[in-house]
Each structure stands twice: as C-alpha cells, then as structure tokens.
Amino acid sequence: MSVTPPGPLGDPLFGNGRQFADDPFGFLRACADSYGDVVRLNLGPRETYMLTNPADVERVLVADAERYRKPQFDDAMDTLLGDGLLMSEGETWQRQRKLANPAFHNRRIGALAGVMADHAESHVADWADGDVVDLQLELARLTVKIIVTAMFGADVTDEEVKTVQENLEPLGARFEPDPRRYLIPDWMPTRENREFDAAIDTLESVIDDIVARRRGTERDPSVDPAGPDGTGVRGPPGDPDADLPMDLLSVLLRARDRGEQTDENLRDELVTMLLAGHDTTALALTYTFYLLSDHPEARERVEGEAKEAVSTGPLTADAVREMEYTERVLNESMRLYPPVYTLFREPKLDVKLGGYRIPEGSALMVSQWVIHRSERWYNDPEKFDPDRWTAERRSQRPRFAYFPFGGGPRHCIGKAFSLLEAKIILATVCSRFDLDYEGPDLSLRGSLTMHPNHPVPMRIRER
Ligand code: HEM
C-alpha cells in the first residue's frame, strides 16, 4: 500500500478548492467513488483527508475519540462560539457538557412537548388555504421561538426572531466553500468580513437582552417551561438544586452565581444553542416536507398518524411516540439530506486509518452526505424509501452508515429535543394541511449546514 492516500489532482494555486467550491456535494461523492476508504484532498493550507468507511468513522468519533479534537478553522467563529459546547475542547467542554446535561434530560425534554405544540399551533394559525409560504423561513422562525422558550425560559418578540434569523445568513456564508478565503485574512475589511462582524454584534445583543430579562429569576421554578413535573429529575435526592428550574439559562446563571461560569462562557453557550438548536431542525423538516410533497403515498400515512396523535387532545410526547412511520420518514429524510453534511476532526498525534498514516494537525472529514448516499451501504441510494428504517433492515448496515447526529462523546446533545420537536411540528401541520412544493428542482448550498440554494415555496392546502 502506498504511503499517501490517493486523491484528485488539483490546480497549483487552489488545489481542489475550485472543484469543491463549484459543487461540494458532487465533488465529494465522486472522490469517494473513485478513491475508496481514505481520500486525500487539497483544500487549503491544511492537509485534508476524507474517510468514507463507517468503520473508520466509528474509530474517530467513538473508539479512539480522545485522539482527536475539533479543528479551529476560523478565529472569528472561535470568538463567537469558542467557549460553547459545539466548539470548545478539554476541560471547558467537559464542564459545559456536564452543566448542560440536566437541561437535556429525557424526562425534561418530554415535558417540553406542550411548549413546542403551542408554538407550532400559533405559528400555523396564520396559514390560509391557497397561501404560498417560504417554508424554510417559516420553520426557521418557528424553531427559534421554540428553542428560546424551551432552553432560555423566555419568550422572544417577532422582531427578535427576525433579527436572529437574518443575522444567521452572514454567519453561514462564512462557511461556504470559497478557495479565495485562504488568501484573505479575517481582519481584512472585505464586505463579507464586515457583515460577519455586524451579525455577531447583533446576535450578541439579542442574547444580552434575553439574559437581562431573565436575570434574578434563576431560582424561580415557574420560569422553566417544562413545569414542576417534567423537572422532577433535576438531580439525586437531596440535591440542593432539586426544586430549581432546569432550563439551560437558569442552570448557567446559577453556575455563574457560584463563580463557575464567566459572562463570556454564558454568552458563548447561549449563542451556540441558538445556532445549533434551530437551523438544523428547521432544515430537517424543510427536506421532510419537500420529500413528502413528492411522495403522496408516504404523505398520506404521515397524515394518518398525525390525525391519530391530535385526536386525543393536546399533543404530548407519548402521543407522538406512536408515530412510527413518521419517524422512519424523518430518518430517511436526514439520510438523503443530512442538515449537518460533514464533520471535521484533527488528530492530536499521528494516527493510522485505513492502512495510511494520517499526520497530526491535518483535517479529517467524515461526511454524512457521502456515506448516507453510498451504494456500498444502501441499495438504490437516491431512492426515498422510509422502510429502510425497519429494525431488520437497519441491523444489516454498519452503525456509522448513518450518523446525522454525529457519535461518541461529542454526539448531538439536542437529538431527543429535535426529534420530538420535528414530530410535534409534523403532527401539527400534517393533521390539517397538505404542503405542495412549487419551486425549482432542489439545489443545495453547503455552509455550516446544508441549505437549499433558493427559497422553498410551498402551497398550503387546508384539508
Ligand atoms: C435535526 C437536528 C439536528 C442535527 C442534524 C444535529 C446535528 C449535530 C451533529 C452532527 C453534531 C456533532 C458535531 C460534531 O461532532 O462535530 C451536533 C452537536 C451538537 N448539537 Fe446538534 N443537531 C440537531 C439539533 C440540535 C438541537 C435542537 C440542539 C440544541 C437544543 C443541538 C445542539 C448541539 C450541540 C450543543 C452540539 C455540540 C455537542 C458537544 O460537542 O458536546 N443540536 N449536532
């Protein structure tokens, strides 16, 4: 075996940067098809290797996780999210994850179903038969409202929702593949860098306002929307915090009172949750509605389950748990359109993967997009087939042939939250409306997450 993994030839200045920027999704899949388990890419100043075998993904994310860290690609992003869960490392990450865990405990999440259903219900109350909405925008605004109420114990004004949503755009743009970026430093006052800085300032000031509204209420149980029952799991018996609110903001404010959290930690964590906690779920749902519009037989089955779920009164976690087919549809949608389409890791020391030596400090790419659509793990991978997710068919595939939420110690802390939220929104919408896609063929744009490259117009038909 050769010492260097195979990979595509690039041009002298940008390497493979241009091919990647022109069509990241097609380019990565073509590389996987041509070069196998480990592909060497020339995407900028760092050596980059893409892993395409689920067994290697499992080693990196789970078995040997302590040998890898998250690479720091971007100083400005580090300033924004640096101490938050998504980007932090080492002791800071451990402390933040431990602090955040009670806010994401299964029983607390289950008790948030009512808040999710209320927001979903009042959001669609404005929809009328025949209207055309930009579904991605609608869902992004709805999921912002839900995350702020559920995790920050606060309500946001429509104006704040709009501000958050609009300022995410320049942040995402920063992550769009553009080979010229390596030639332009972050401090250069380009239009993009200026917009990025302004977006950060605005987002931080929305967060600061929310924190100011909540200051002093972190020991008042009535602020936690999960309610007293849902928060009964706050800690072991005798835990001094057992009766206190467990929404993330209350938890962090108390940690700050104890001196375990600086204002900066707190702000980074809230910005992280706001970003990580709404765009992803909104995208998963956007792609799900898009696929359902194209597959009427699947849509009918989801509608049937949705009507059943709402038939017994206000939606609960138990009622949507019964929506088994809908869950398969969601799984299949995140297979075909994973909102997070690639993860990056950096080896802390030289490692061996797929028979090759991968040097310390290089960038490792493990791409959900590539693996989820590979013929090696899925028959007819382009086909929308929710029945791939029966227990029997699942068991025939390697575990990391599907990893929309990552894996190992850094797996998504919001997985249960987002699956419940997605089912509640699907139940609310599908029990009343059919959504028919009226846009162009779906084209995709890679930024921090995988976005449609155009608005997503859906015609609403009331049943
Ligand atoms: C469909 C929805 C979602 C998808 C597809 C998704 C995907 C992911 C993935 C792939 C990771 C791992 C990143 C890595 O290993 O580098 C991750 C981490 C994370 N997610 Fe999610 N996520 C979703 C929803 C949420 C929600 C609703 C929240 C918050 C309420 C959230 C908060 C986070 C956080 C804080 C991390 C970092 C965890 C850590 O490193 O300890 N996510 N997510």
Image: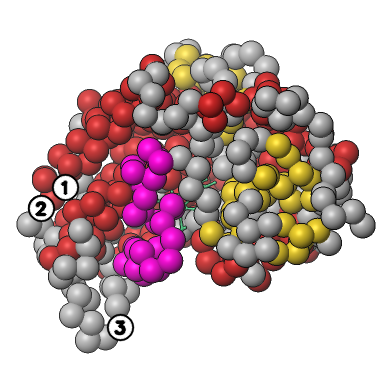
Q: Is mark 3 within 8 Å of ligand 1?
A: no
Label 2, secondary structure: give it: loop
Magenta-highlighted stretch: main secondary structure? helix
> Who is closer to the viewer here, 94 or 17?
17
Residue type at numbered disc 3: Pro
Label 1, secondary structure: give it: helix
Residue found at x 62% / y 65%: 349
* Label 3 environment density (alpha carbons within 10 Å; few <14, some 14–19, many ≥20): few
- For residue 86: magenta? yes
- Mark 2 and mark 3: Cα distance apart in space: 26 Å
Q: For the residues carrying marks 2 and 3, which lies nearer the camera in this image?
A: 2
Residue type at numbered disc 2: Arg
Looking at the picture, how far across and down is residue 235, in whole percent? 29, 78
Q: Is mark 1 within 8 Å of ligand 1?
A: no
Q: Which residue is mark 3?
A: 236
> Who is closer to the viewer here, 180 or 254?
180
Residue type at numbered disc 1: Val
Instruction: Specify start and end residues of the magenta stretch as a single range.
Output: 75-100
Q: Which residue is mark 1?
A: 211
Q: Is mark 2 within 8 Å of ligand 1?
A: no
Residue found at x 53% / y 37%: 449
Label 2 near label 1: C-beta < 8 Å?
A: yes
Label 3 near label 2: C-beta < 8 Å?
A: no
Q: Which residue is mark 2?
A: 215
Q: For the residues carrying marks 3 and 1, which lies nearer the camera in this image?
A: 1
Residue found at x 10% / y 53%: 215
Is residue 336 among the parts visible in the rendering?
A: no
Label 3, secondary structure: give it: loop
Q: Is residue 237 above or below residue 84?
A: below
